[in-house]
Amino acid sequence: MRKAGETPGNGKRHLKAGGCADERDAQCCYSLSTRWPITELCQIVQVSRSVYYDWRQRPVNTERLQWRIRVRELYNQSRGVISSRTLSHLLTNEGRSIGRWKARRLMQECGLQSRQAGAHRYRSAGDVLLKKNRTLF
């Protein structure tokens, strides 16, 4: 019987096309491959070598890279306040059909996180008049 959180089979994970965490593990192995052997890195990260090499052979998804570039542009234009829902609405209005979950995933892949806008400071007319009167003296 398997324990909770235990992987089936030999205990190694397999990379899926949309598996963000697994792809990060494979990228980590790739970046560290100049210092350590791939076999040891794959054992540490618990990714099978054959799947790692398969990941390296995959073609780069240029469409997804273009999505990421546009997401970063919109994020910077909004000064970091844009959410995945707003992002999906803006991209849909541009003619690119995208759901909020895909927008969320793209933001995660880019390392972007929505920030809450700062609170506005509302002043009453009396406060402004008092400040003007104080400057006269």
Image (spheres, grey):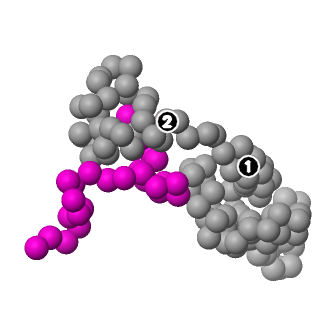
Q: Which residues are magenta?
A: 1-29
Would you say 56 lies left or right of 80 here? left
Residue 40 lies within the magenta run? no
Disc 1 element: helix
Q: Residue at x 45, y 40 (%)?
A: 54
Q: Residue at x 36, y 40 (%)?
A: 50
Disc 2 element: helix
| Count of marks overlaid on the render | 2
Image quarter in which the C terminus is found: bottom right
Residue 17: where, in percent of width, then height? 52, 54
Residues at marks 1 and 2, CA–CA distance in whole angstroms: 18 Å
Would you say 31 lies left or right of 89 here? left
Work out whether residue 104 or residue 79 is closer to the camera in this orientation and state it.
Answer: 104
Residue 40: where, in percent of width, then height? 24, 31
**Observer able to see residue 62:** yes
Amino acid at the residue labelled 1: Glu
Residue 8: where, in percent of width, then height? 23, 63
Q: Residue at x 55, y 40 (%)?
A: 58
Work out whether residue 119 or residue 91 is closer to the camera in this orientation and state it.
Answer: 91
Amino acid at the residue labelled 2: Arg
Per the image, the residue denoted by label 1 is: 63
Q: Residue at x 40, y 39 (%)?
A: 52
**Observer able to see residue 90:** no
Work out whether residue 79 or residue 66 is closer to the camera in this orientation and state it.
Answer: 66
Mark carried by residue 56: 2
Foreground: disc 1 or disc 2: 2
Residue 13 lies within the magenta run? yes
Local packing at callout 2 (Cα closer than 10 Å; few below 14, some 14-19, many 20+) is few
Q: Earlier in the sequence, mark 1 or mark 2?
A: 2
